[in-house]
Image: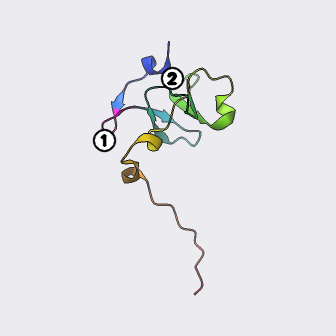
Amino acid sequence: MSTTQLRRIDKCKACGAPIMWAETSAAKAIPIDVSPTPRGNVVLYHGPGSGKLLALFGKKAQSGATELYESHFVTCPRAAEFRKPRKRSGAMRLP
């Protein structure tokens, strides 16, 4: 059974595309495109015991994976609307 059959499908609030939510290793929610793609770099799996949909990224995650997915931040035409500003360091710039 594929990952998409086990998860509730949601819609992107910006573009309306179907997405599913996964959790990163930093415990942050990330939108994932529903359909697997050969250009993907995300492997999805269900966490032991919790049943949460978890996301692994990069080449290490891809080894042996049968289905690769893409973050919806990559494919959404309106992704910039959801980007949070980066935190600035406490250091002051000198003139």
Please name whichever residue, 59 or 46, is drawn nearer the observer in this view of the structure.
Answer: 59
Residue extending farthest to the front is 38
Q: Nearer the viewer, residue 64 or 85?
A: 64
**Residue 17 is inside the magenta segment:** yes
SS state under label 2: loop
Q: Is residue 1 above or below residue 13?
A: above
The quadrant of the rendering that contains the C terminus is: bottom right
Chief secondary structure of the magenta span? loop
Give the answer, above or below, for where 71 lies relative to 85.
above
Q: Which residues are magenta?
A: 11-18
Q: Which marked residue is nearer to the observer: mark 1 or mark 2?
A: 1
- All told, the count of numbered labels is 2
Q: Amino acid at mark 1?
A: Lys
Location of mark 1 (residue): 13
Q: Residue at x 63, y 38 (%)?
A: 58
Which residue is tagged 2? 51
Residue lying farthest top? Answer: 1
